[in-house]
Image (spheres, rainbow, N blue to C red):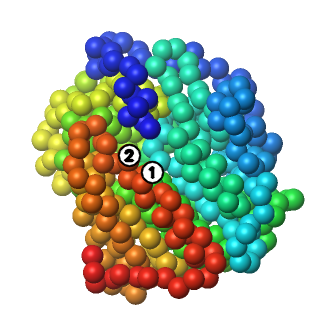
Amino acid sequence: MLIALASLFVPYAHADDPTIDDRHPYFNEDEYQAFYTPPVPLPAGQPGDLIRTEPSRLVLEPSGELGMIMANGTRIMYRSNDARGNPMAVTGTYFEPHNAWPGKGPRPLIVYGPGTQGQGDQCAPSRQFNQGIHWSPWLDLAFNYEELFVATMVARGFAIVMTDYEGLGTPGLHTYANRVSQGHAMLDAARAAKNLPDTSLTRDGPLAFWGYSQGGGAAASAAEMADSYAPELHIVGSYAGAPPADLKALFPFIDGSMLIGAVGYALNGVITAYPEHEAAIRATLTPRGADMLFKVQDQCVAETLTKFMFRHLQPYFNQDIFALVEQEPFKSLFDEQKLGRMKPNAPVLINSNRFDPLVPWAPAMQMGRDWCAQGADIEARTNEQPPFLNKAMINHGLPMLVDGEPAMQWIADRFNGLPTTPNCGQF
């Protein structure tokens, strides 16, 4: 989906010119500022408490004439905790299905972690569901590709709450791929959905986590943090598709790819979450690297793709980038983000393409083996789609669609109480 969007444009030759301010003064925040600006200070409360809500228009495209999502939408702002345990406000969307749940028991809830959207506030999924498509001159384009799955899920009777994560929509930069912050945002989104009045959810009803790519990492983090952070939740399973289980392992894969700009998202997020390391991180950047971080902080992923696609990492750093990730502070920062150290309290399905050119297969399988060693109920599935146009990320994008339907059936089986088929020791 992202690849198709990117193919509509030719990258600007000045994308790496540090003399050009390429941020977006055109995006009009007036419509959203009142909702997305949290009260200061935050009201007293606990993680998952609702701060504010409002009805949300759910459209597939701006006119709303080309179909609809079969649910009532509620935009939410709720309390959560950042990577340091400090309280913060996070936004998201709750979807109350029009259709009844045809399975066993009360209506289930899917806590949905979105994939890479970008780092600008205009990229927040809760805004995209309201707009359908976002555009401002000239390449600031966002289409909420997650709506393909959301529309299907709610039509089948699943309630959904999708988080925007930390800083995506709300003030401050999005802490892209931060394990702790994303896990908190997912778990607290579940609590927030349960706190909404006038829904078909029950307080102790079942829930599952879902996500692919960045969202797969968020779902995996929520699964393994649930026991310690939100033990009261009735979790029946988690789907972690193409999870970035070890961020260090991504660098050789992302080098020269369409999504090289995501390195900028990640470094901006690290600086936001761990500001004591900002000087050390910026000291490793060339002027071109500093400029990339400056520009991508206001971009959605389609623009980042078109302006930074197929570049190599090394020109953005003044040291050998592949040696740098093994040096401090990078080594400790990346180790902190590694998944697989805590046992999930419910079954997990891991999907990964053996030839994924962006989020490597081996660390995802190692995460599963680490969980198996702790006695977790894990099923790992490998997609064998052969390599094709690897730096265009075909083998990362297509498995999201190919594996999505079987994953939805696996999630439905968990809600219906069917036995799992773990394959620990076989992957």
Q: Position of residue 106 (x, y in %)?
A: 76, 74
Please state which amino acid type lies under the numbered disc 1.
Leu
Looking at the picture, does residue 317 appear above or below residue 384? above
Residue sticking out furthest to the right: 198
Query: How many residues crowd around disc 2 within 10 Å: few (fewer than 14), some, or many (20 or more)?
Result: some
State the residue in front, 140 or 318. Answer: 140
At x 33% / y 37%, what residue is drawn? 259
At x 59% / y 70%, what residue is drawn? 412
Q: Position of residue 347 (x, y in %)?
A: 49, 78
At x 36% / y 39%, what residue is drawn? 262
Tell me how many marks there are: 2
- Residue 401 marker: 1
Please state which amino acid type lies under the numbered disc 2.
Gly
Of discs 2 and 1, which sits in the foreground? 1
| Secondary structure of the residue carrying numbered label 1 | helix
At x 14% / y 38%, what residue is drawn? 319
| Secondary structure of the residue carrying numbered label 2 | helix
State the residue in front, 128 or 31. Answer: 128
Looking at the picture, does residue 201 appear above or below residue 51? below
Is residue 139 visible to us here? yes
Does the CB distance between marks 2 and 1 fall below 8 Å? yes
**Quadrant hosting residue 217:** bottom left
Is residue 226 visible to us here? no
The residue under label 2 is 397
Query: Marks 2/1: CA distance?
Result: 7 Å
Q: Position of residue 403 (x, y in %)?
A: 43, 58
Q: From the image, which quarter does the N terminus lie in? A: top left
